[in-house]
Image (tube, rainbow, N blue to C red):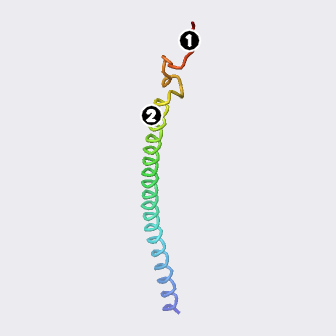
């Protein structure tokens, strides 16, 4: 009887210790995965911002070329204005 009780206590102790160690390792791996996901997210955001800046510069060049857009890009001396004669 004592042997069986000892084996049961030993098995329960081993199971508890193993579960605690697994949780610690899992939480570490979750933190690593979360850091990796955050890093990839920041990389995608940086690439997105870079592409957005390129598109904006191209759009501004086109507006400047054709004289359209907001006031900063409109030419003051419009060659197609009416003659007051």
Say which of 71 and 41 sits in front. Answer: 71
- Outermost residue toward the top? 85
Question: Quadrant of the rendered structure where residue 36 is?
Answer: bottom left
**Residue at 51% in and 80% down:** 12
Residue most extreme to the front: 85
Q: Where is residue 67 in the image (x, y as percent from the top left)?
A: 50, 27
How many angstroms separate mark 2 from mark 1 (CA)?
29 Å
Residue 23: x %, y % from top left: 48, 68
Which numbered dot is residue 83? 1
| Residue placed most toward the observer, 14 or 19 | 19
Examine the rendered structure and indicate whether residue 26 appears above or below residue 71: below
Q: Where is residue 41 in the image (x, y as percent from the top left)?
A: 46, 53
The disc at residue 69 is none
Mark 1: give few (<14), some (14-19) or many (20+) Cα within 10 Å: few
x 57%, y 14%: residue: 82
Q: Nearer the viewer, residue 8 or 51?
A: 51
First in sequence, mark 2 or 1: give its number: 2
The secondary structure type at the circle numbered 2 is helix
Q: Nearer the viewer, mark 2 or mark 1?
A: 1
Q: Is mark 1 on a helix, strand or loop?
A: loop
The residue at 46%/31% (across/down) is: 65
Q: Are marks 2 and 1 in contact (CB under 8 Å)?
A: no
Relative to 79, is 46 above or below?
A: below
Q: Disc 2 designates what residue? A: 61
Assess disc 2: are there few (<14), some (14-19) or many (≥20) residues with their C-alpha within 10 Å of its C-alpha: few
């Amino acid at each position: 009887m004592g042997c069986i009780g000892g084996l049961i206590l030993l098995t329960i102790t081993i199971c508890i210790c193993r579960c605690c160690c697994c949780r610690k390792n899992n939480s570490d791996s979750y933190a690593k995965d979360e850091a990796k996901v955050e890093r990839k997210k920041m990389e995608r955001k940086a690439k997105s911002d870079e592409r957005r800046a390129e598109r904006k510069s191209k759009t501004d060049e086109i507006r400047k070329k054709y004289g359209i857009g907001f006031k900063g890009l409109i030419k003051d001396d419009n060659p197609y204005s009416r003659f007051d004669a």
